[in-house]
Image (tube, rainbow, N blue to C red):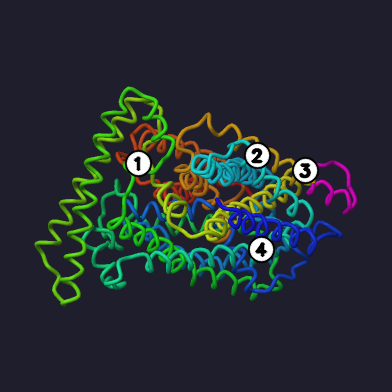
Amino acid sequence: MQLFDWIVLVVTLLFIVIYGAWKTKGSKNVEDYILGSNETPWYMVGLSVMATQASAITFLSTPGQAYHDGMGFVQFYFGLPIAMVVICLTFIPIYHKYKVYTAYEYLEKRFDLKTRSLAAILFLFQRGLGTGLTIYAPAIILSALLGWNLTYMNIIIGVLVIIYTFSGGTKAVNVTQKQQMFVIMTGMLITFFLILHFLPNEMTFSNALHIAGANDKMNIVNFSADPEEKYTFWSGITGGFFLALAYFGTDQSQVGRYLSGKSVRESQMGLVMNGLLKVPMQFFILLTGVMVFVFFQFNPVPLNFNPNNKALIEQSQYKGEYHSLEKKLNALSEDKKVINLLYIDQLNQDYDNPILRKELIGLSAKEKDLRDRAKEIILKADSGSETNDKDYVFFHFILHYLPKGLIGLLLAVIISAAMSSTASGLNALASTTAIDIYKRNLKEEKSEKHYLNATKFFTLFWGIVAILFASIGTLFENLIQLVNIVGSIFYGTVLGIFLVGFYIKFVKAKAIFYSALASQITIFIIYYYAIYIFPTGEEKLGYLWLNFIGAMLTIVLSSILQMTVFRKEKR
C-alpha cells in the first residue's frame, strides 16, 4: 500500500458515506425511512438489488472459486432469471396491493400473527447472522493480507455503514449503492483487462481460454444427476431457483429494495434488469478468476495463498519440509511456463497439440498433489488451521501485481461491496424489528415520529450486533463458506409459507404454522446428518437442495394437515 493507494481508498469510501448521509437526511416518517417515499426509479431498484446481493465475498471468493474449480459455479445462478419472472408476476403485485412495509406483514393478512412472527423471527436470525458475516468475511481476509487489526477492520466497516443507513434509511441505501456498483464494476473491469495485458505478448484471449480449457476450468455446465455434486445444471435450475425465489421474494433486505419503487411496473422492471444482468456479471467475475489462473501459469505461485498458513509454518518444526515442497513447486512452475509457451505457439499455428495438452494436465495434477501435501503439513503444524485458500487467491494477485492506485481502488471495491450488503441487511433488520415485532405488539398507539425513531434505534442496535458478531467471529471456523449455507437452511421454509399464501388458498393459519415449524426442524436434521458432519467435499447432499426440500415440505405438510387435522379451521 503506497500513499496514492491510501488516498484512493479513503477518498472513495468517505465520498460514499458523506454523499449518502447528506443526500438523504431528514426522513419525515416511517414510510419515508423504510420505503423511501416510493420514489425509486426502476434502474435504481435494479442496481440496489444487484448491489445488495453482491457482497464483498462475491469479489473475494468467486474468483478464487474459479481459480481452483473452474466456471461451474455459474450454474448456481441458472434458476435466478426464472425466479425474477415469478416474483414480478406474483410477489410484487400482491405486496403493492396490500401496501406492506415488510414482506412478513402480508402473512398476517393472509394467515395470522403467529405465522407472521415466525417468518419474521426466522428472517431476523439468519439475516442477523448473515449481516455479521458480510462484515467479518472481508475483514478477516484484509487483516490477514495487509496485517491490519481484525477488530478495527470490523468496527471501521460497521461504523461507516451505520452512519448513512441510520441517517437516511432506504433512500440512503439506494443512493449509496449506485456509487458502490460504479466503483465495484469499474475496479473489476480494469483488473480484468490488466490481467490480459500482463499475459505473454504472443498470447491472445483465445489462447488463454484454450489453456484454461486444457486445465478443465471451462466446464460451464454439468448435467450430472448425482445429489452429492454441489453445482450442476439441475441443482442450479431447481435448488438455485428456490434459493433465488426465497431470497429476492421473501428476504426483507431484497424486498425492501423493490418495495421502494415508484410503481408496480418500476419495481418489476428493476427485478427484470437484475435477472438479465446477474448471470453475465457472475460469469464475468468467474472468468476473471480463470484469467488469474492462466496468469499464474507464467508467474510464480505460492504453495498456499493464505499468508496465515505461511507464517504458521515458519514458526513450526515442519518449516524444512514445507520449503522442500516450495522448491518443487518453483521448478514445476518453470516447466509449466515452458510447456504453456510451446502450447501457445502451436495454437497460433491453428493446431491444438494433444500431446502438449496432456502434459499440461499432468503438470496441473502434480501441482495439486504438492498443494495437498502442503495442506497436510499445515494441519500437522496446527490441526485447527483453515487450509482452504480459495478466498485469498484474488487478493494475492491484487497486492502483488497491480500498479499503484489500483490496489487502493480494489480495496475500495471490496469494502464498498461489504458496505452495500451490510447496509441493506441493517435496513431490513431494523424495518422488520420495528414493524413486525415492536409496532405489532404494542398495546397503545404511538405517533409516526415515535416509530421513525424506533426504526432508527433498531438500525443502530443491529449495526452494533453485527459488529459484535463479526468481532467474535474468530471463535468459529469456516465462516466465509457458511454464507450461502446459512441462507439455504432457513430460506426454504420461509419461501414455502409465502408460496402457500400466494397459491394454495384452502390452507389456513394453523396448518401452515405447524407445517413450517416441522419443516424447519427437519431441515436442521437433514443439514446436520447429510452436510455438517462430513468434511468439505464429502457431503451427501449439495446444500442448494435444502431450499427445494424446505419449500416442498412446508407446502405438502400444510396441505395434508389442512385436509386432515385442521379441515374445520375457518381462518
Marks 3/1: CA distance?
Answer: 49 Å
Observer-side mark, 3 or 2, equals 2
Sequence-earlier tag: 2 or 4: 4
Dot 1 crowding, Cα within 10 Å, few <14, some 14–19, many 20+: many
Q: Is residue 172 magenta?
A: no
Decide if residue 362 is in sight here: yes
Q: Residues within 10 Å of mark 4 (few under 14, many from 20)?
A: some
The kind of residue on which mark 1 rests is Asn
Q: Nearer the viewer, mark 2 or mark 1?
A: 1
Residue 299, position in %: x, y? 31, 55
Looking at the rendered structure, the secondary structure element under dot 1 is loop
- Residue found farthest to the top: 317
Precedes in sequence: disc 3 or disc 1: 1
186 in relation to 133, above or below = below
Q: Which residue is mark 4?
A: 95
To which quarter of the image does residue 473 belong?
Answer: top right
Res. 304 mark: 1
Which callout, 3 or 1, points to the residue nearer the camera? 1
